[in-house]
Image (cartoon, rainbow, N blue to C red):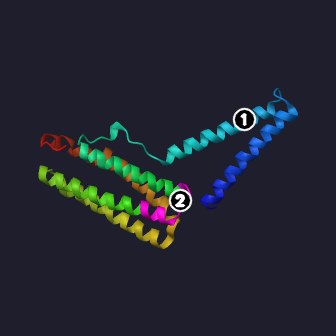
Amino acid sequence: MSRSAKMILLALFAGSLIVALTLTFINLGIKHPLPWFIIATLIALSLFSSWNEKHHFVEWKDAYSVGIESLDNDHRKLLNLINLLQTALHYPTGEEFEKQALEQVVAYTKYHFEREEKMLLEAGFADYDAHKRKHDAMINKVDEFMQDYESRGHDALEVVALFLKNWLLKHINGTDKEYTSLLQEKGFK
């Protein structure tokens, strides 16, 4: 079922509940349990919708910090771009928005990797080669996703958005934190 169809069905369901609520209050009165059940259903629907939205999007947490402001800013921007991709996935934004969101996250990821790798080289990071291989593998995977998007369109977005979100958070919280003390010692900000 398409995103538009899901949103229309959800809106119709919520609208039907509101009409039913009004009619049950008028016909059955405030003491009858049915209108209160409908109110509880509307509240549950709203809470589920909120939870579902938060489940797809990621917010920056201080725990993600690698201790280098410029790289933390890059990571924040990457998370925001991934959230744009999530928006394209879960809301009817159109093909142009989807493609632009995907291209932006790919381009900024490549820019960030180049910048981070330059800092690691300048600082003499001992595990530079292994770190760069992880970046290269991720870029190769993202290039595959781009090709998949070109052939399948919107249907390819869910896999790429989930991969990017999970990979980035795992990379920031694991591999990237390995260089924090060295870059701080070398005066990188």
Please tell me whether residue 45 is drawn above or below residue 7 in the rendered image: above
Span colored in magenta: 90-101
Q: Which quadrant: the N terminus? A: bottom right
Q: Dominant secondary structure of the magenta stretch?
A: helix
Which percent across, then down, holds residue 33?
Answer: 80, 30
Which percent across, then down, holds residue 45?
Answer: 65, 41
Give the residue displayed 13% in from the left and 40% down from the top. 185
Q: Among all residues in the image, which is located at the extreme right?
A: 27
The residue where tag 1 is placed is 39
Give the residue displayed 41% in from the left and 71% down from the top. 147
Which percent across, then down, holds residue 93?
Answer: 53, 59
The residue where tag 2 is placed is 93
Q: Residue 64 vs residue 38: left or right?
A: left
Amino acid type indicated by mark 1: Ile
Q: Among all residues in the image, which is located at the extreme top?
A: 31
Q: Are marks 1 and 2 in contact (CB under 8 Å)?
A: no
Please tell me whether residue 151 is drawn above or below residue 121 in the rendered image: below
Distance of label 1 from label 2 (alpha carbons)? 31 Å
Closer to the eye: label 1 or 2: 2
Q: Residue 5 vs residue 112: left or right?
A: right
Which percent across, then down, holds residue 75?
Answer: 32, 48
Amino acid type indicated by mark 2: Thr
Give the residue displayed 40% in from the left and 50% down from the top. 80
Q: Which quadrant: the C terminus? A: top left
